[in-house]
Amino acid sequence: MRLQSDRLAAARPYLYLTPTLLVLATFTYLPIARLAEMSLHAPGTGASLGPWIGLSAYQKLFSNPLFWRILGQTFAYVFASVPIAMALGLGLALLLDQPLRGLGLLRALYYAPVVMPTVAVAALALWMFNPNGGLVDYLLHLVGIAPIPWLVDTTWALPTLIVIAVWKNVGYYMVIYLAGLQALPQAVLDAARLDGARPLVRFFTITLPLLRPTTFFIGVVALIGSFQVFDFVNLMTQGGPSNATNVLVYFAYQNGFAYMQLGLAAALSLVMFALVLAILGLVAWTFNR
Amino acid sequence: MMRRFATYAVLVAGLFPLLLPFYWMAVTSLKAKRDVFTATPQWLPLHPAWDNYPLAWSAEPFGRFFFNSIVVTTLIVASQLVLASLAAFALARFEFRGRRAIFWLVVAALIVPVQITFVANFMTLARFGLLNSYLALVAPYAASAFGTFLLRQAFAAVPRQLEDAARLDGCSGLAFLWHVLLPLSRPTLIAFALVAVVAHWNDYFWPLIVTNNNAVRTLPIGLGMFVGQEVTTDWNLLMAASIFVSAPMLLLFFLMQRYFVRARLHTGIRG
């Protein structure tokens, strides 16, 4: 009897972990293996796999110039939107990290876009940047700038999506930076102030280095998040005009669901996963050096 | 004095690009169709067309989508809270073989978003004939690596002595989780629940993959369909629909602000 209850006690933590591990295994870990399997077989009928085709899906992918273009565009999107939004978020956090009245309300307002559904933001942005009656062009007209073909021009479309993403995310980075700032050792900052260090010098020699862990954290979250950009593309441009805003997830989605090339879509997903891992590794390495 | 003034000036100037879109969304949603496209934009809805809201509401089966969103979000968040509490309890308060490995296994799941696994998950659900069901919308999110991690940190912070004292009072195992750990971790629980509600209420990607039937479509999908149809025409209705789709989350955020900020302080997933 005693032995049995001991065994039960020992099994307990595993029991508590089982549901979570089952879900994660089914929908997060096994799918990676499943993707690999799918990418090595021809598409079958229904849910079954066709014959083994080796690496030809990858060959097809890597020999497609469109893939490389889309890869480049995804990188452009990530490495433009992330630093811009992070810098703005840090700037706002510095301004808001002061004992001034009314800042609580301002913080909340800056954060509001973060809780908006991407679909509503996309609808609003389509209207604001609309070539026919859009408010942005009107405001530019007031200061003497000719209308810009925001989302319909191959040069402008991607930068427009970047602007929208920055608008949506900046409040999120601001809040985390604020938390980072409030956790800084006040004594160090005060000492520098007493020594007469100028604000800009103080910022670059003390505040910014002390914020390194926060910057690292935001960088990781932001990189993973923006690599997955899909919603704005699907809702606002469908990857166009002529693929100028096509990105990796959208390309995988097109291959899988529009062109019925599931093997290719699976290969693309794995390439994406490898890229995310590589970039995270790189970021971790630069920050830990 | 000058510095304070300058700070306010910059912050308020920054509010212009931030708030103008919200304002424009609200104003447009109240305009009659003929007032939407005017040579000079009308900054005030002089003749507010309140009809736009019921009109937009009935343009798609938004009532059904609303219901679906509530069901799906509730199921996901409830399931995540239960499973994450149990898993976090094991990871934080038990010594057992493989604990470290399992902890890292859970954390590693954070870097595998659904945007990478969707092709495989779609195939799995299709094979079992589960597409277009609440189950398909909920199952992949039934557990949360993030929630597990977050609660583990909160549970681990509860001192050992408290556990010993509770055991003397006959409160151990799940009773300890329920009567001591969870109440003590209330702020973390609420913060996590709020972040999860926002994330899944707003989720567009996964429902798009697994639904093509109005019976199970959620609000973001409904609004997305509306975007597809209404572009270049009824901006007033589209803005009205965008407002009633976003309103619950904006409201929740303004009411529960301090908890949201807390969630970000301790963690930071996006909502």
Image (cartoon, rainbow, N blue to C red):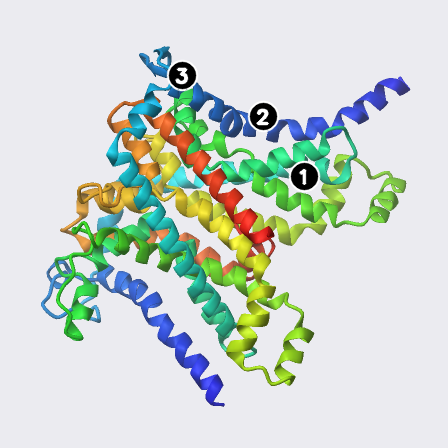
Q: CA distance from mark 2 to mark 3?
A: 18 Å
Determine whether label 1 and label 2 are within 8 Å by CB.
no
Q: Is residue B111 left or right of residue A270?
A: right
Which residue, given by chain and number where applicable, does mark 2 sit on? Answer: A22
Circle 2 chain: A
* Amino acid carrying mark 1 in the image: Ala
In the rendered image, residue B176, in percent from the top left (x then y), is placed at: 77, 40
Label 3: element kind: helix
Residue at mark 3:
B127
Say above or below: B201 vs B213.
Answer: below
Q: Which mark is residue B37?
A: none
Q: Label 2 sits on what residue type?
A: Leu
* Residue A196: image location, x then y, percent: 60, 85
Q: Is residue A102 visible?
A: yes
Instruction: State which quadrant residue B18 falls in.
Output: bottom left
Determine the CA span between mark 1 and mark 3.
Answer: 32 Å
- State yes or no: discs 2 and 3 in contact (Cβ < 8 Å): no
Task: Please rate how many residues cluster around mark 3, counting C-alpha atoms within 10 Å: few if below 14, some from 14 to 19, many from 20.
Answer: few
Distance between the alpha carbons at the discs numbered 1 and 2: 15 Å
The residue sitting at 47% across, 65% down in the picture is: A108
The answer to whether B241 is drawn above or below residue A188 in the figure is: above
Q: Is B60 located above or below residue A108 in the figure?
A: above
**Is B15 or A219 nearer to us in this picture?**
A219
Residue named by callout 1: B88
Amino acid type, label 3: Arg
Q: Chain of mark 3?
A: B
x and y percentages locating residue B52 in the rendered image: 22, 55
